[in-house]
Image: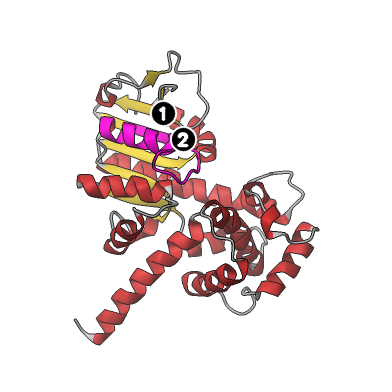
């Protein structure tokens, strides 16, 4: 391997890690025989259970299982058990997971390495867990997230500055850090800013110091920054939200859903058995289009203990 190739490969591996860091933040109907015996079949296709649940679609040899998940961090949690249960039953050929960029393609080596390195973490992400199941089974996985250029272009077209995108991504990441037990905001912010500079190619007009970010947050959201008080709702897609980060969240949600659905359609054209593992809000956003394209689903949940 040449020196140039060595550094290119090294940069690709680092960028894959940056992505996980940044975004941890994708005709059917008829007999769902491929899904086998359900743990708890929901008797009416129109009655949607509370998440986590699986929505199963099947027709003409094509089978889709969408895990409408909740973000948990233990392999013994309900969400992880459901993922494991459905994976064993469905035997998917490809798993579409949250947080990975679609542009990285199917089972790229850098992300396979990342998943293997983090699949035994004490606080585990369900995307890493689902991807690890695919790797262990010799199956494929792919992310459904838009690229940095797609996000920058989409937000810029709506009049948002790149400085706002930088600030929004920090706010969106804070609940993830806290869920994983990471609370050293000073250190986390420093590393996050460096990673975003590389992954998003932000210039000095977008990048901020920690103190500048806190000032931006106060101006944007009209309240004092409090790391402990930040919740996922602050970066959530709230159409009439009072916070700038919520308004950005609306546009980011639109950009992400377009990417997830495009990737899902691409995977259904290439594979017969597909599993999707995404947060429950994404399923809520996508279910109408999924039903229009694939027909009504059958729901599965784990049995009550």
**Horizontal and vertical percent for residue 15?**
40, 69
Mark 1 Cα-neighbour bin, 10 Å: few <14, some 14–19, many ≥20: many
Q: Is residue 70 magenta?
A: yes
Q: Is residue 30 left or right of residue 223?
A: left
Q: Which residue is mark 2?
A: 68
Magenta-colored stretch includes residue 13: no
Q: Residue at x 69, y 69 (%)?
A: 213
User: What residue lies at 26% left-to-right and 43% top-to-bottom?
Assistant: 270
Q: CA distance from mark 1 to mark 2?
A: 7 Å
User: Residue 269 versus residue 80: which sits nearer the camera?
Assistant: 80
Q: From what the image shows, is residue 89 above or below residue 153?
A: above
Q: Which mark is residue 46?
A: none
Q: Are marks 1 and 2 in contact (CB under 8 Å)?
A: yes
Question: From the viewer's perspective, is 228 left or right of 2?
Answer: right
Residue nearest the viewer, comparing 11 with 63:
11
Question: Is 5 left or right of 46, judged from the image as shown?
Answer: left
List the single residue furthest toward the bottom: 3
Which residue is label 1 attached to? 55
The part of the image, by quadrant, that contains residue 281 is top right
Q: Secondary structure at mark 1?
A: strand
- For the record, the magenta segment spans 64-89
With respect to residue 247, does 82 lie above or below? above
Q: Can you say whether 288 is above or below 146 in the image? A: above
Residue occupying the point 67% across, 59% down: 227
* Dot placed on the residue nearer the N-terminal end, 1 or 2: 1
**Image x and y of residue 214, in percent:** 72, 67
Rendering quarter of residue 13: bottom left
- Element marked by disc 2: strand
Residue sitting at x 55%, y 64%: 152
In the rendered image, the residue lying farthest to the right is 222
- Image quadrant where one finds the N terminus: bottom left
């Amino acid at each position: 391997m040449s020196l140039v190739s060595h550094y290119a490969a090294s940069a690709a591996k680092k960028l894959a890690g940056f992505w996980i860091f940044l975004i941890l933040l994708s005709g059917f109907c008829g007999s769902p025989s491929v899904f086998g015996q359900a743990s708890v079949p929901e008797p009416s296709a129109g009655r949607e259970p509370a998440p986590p649940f699986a929505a199963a679609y099947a027709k003409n040899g094509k089978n889709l299982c969408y895990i409408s998940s909740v973000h948990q961090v233990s392999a013994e949690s309900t969400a992880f058990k459901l993922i494991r249960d459905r994976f064993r039953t469905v035997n998917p050929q490809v798993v579409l997971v949250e947080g990975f960029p679609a542009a990285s393609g199917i089972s790229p080596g850098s992300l396979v390495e990342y998943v293997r390195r983090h699949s035994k973490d004490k606080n585990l992400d369900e995307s890493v867990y689902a991807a690890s199941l695919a790797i262990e089974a010799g199956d494929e996985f792919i992310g459904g997230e838009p690229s940095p250029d797609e996000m920058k272009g989409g937000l810029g077209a709506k009049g948002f500055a790149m400085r706002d995108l930088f600030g929004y991504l920090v706010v969106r990441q804070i609940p993830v850090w806290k869920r994983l037990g990471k609370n050293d905001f000073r250190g986390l912010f420093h590393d996050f800013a460096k990673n975003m500079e590389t992954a998003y190619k932000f210039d000095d007009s977008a990048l901020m110091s920690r103190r500048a970010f806190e000032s931006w947050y106060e101006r944007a959201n009209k309240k004092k920054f409090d790391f402990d008080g930040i919740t996922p709702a602050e970066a959530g897609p709230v159409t009439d939200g009072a916070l700038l980060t919520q308004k950005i969240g609306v546009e980011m949600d639109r950009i992400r859903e377009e990417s997830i659905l495009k990737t899902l359609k691409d995977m259904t054209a290439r594979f017969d058995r597909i599993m999707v593992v995404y947060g429950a809000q994404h399923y809520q956003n996508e279910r109408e289009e999924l039903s229009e394209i694939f027909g009504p689903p059958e729901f599965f949940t784990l049995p009550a203990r």
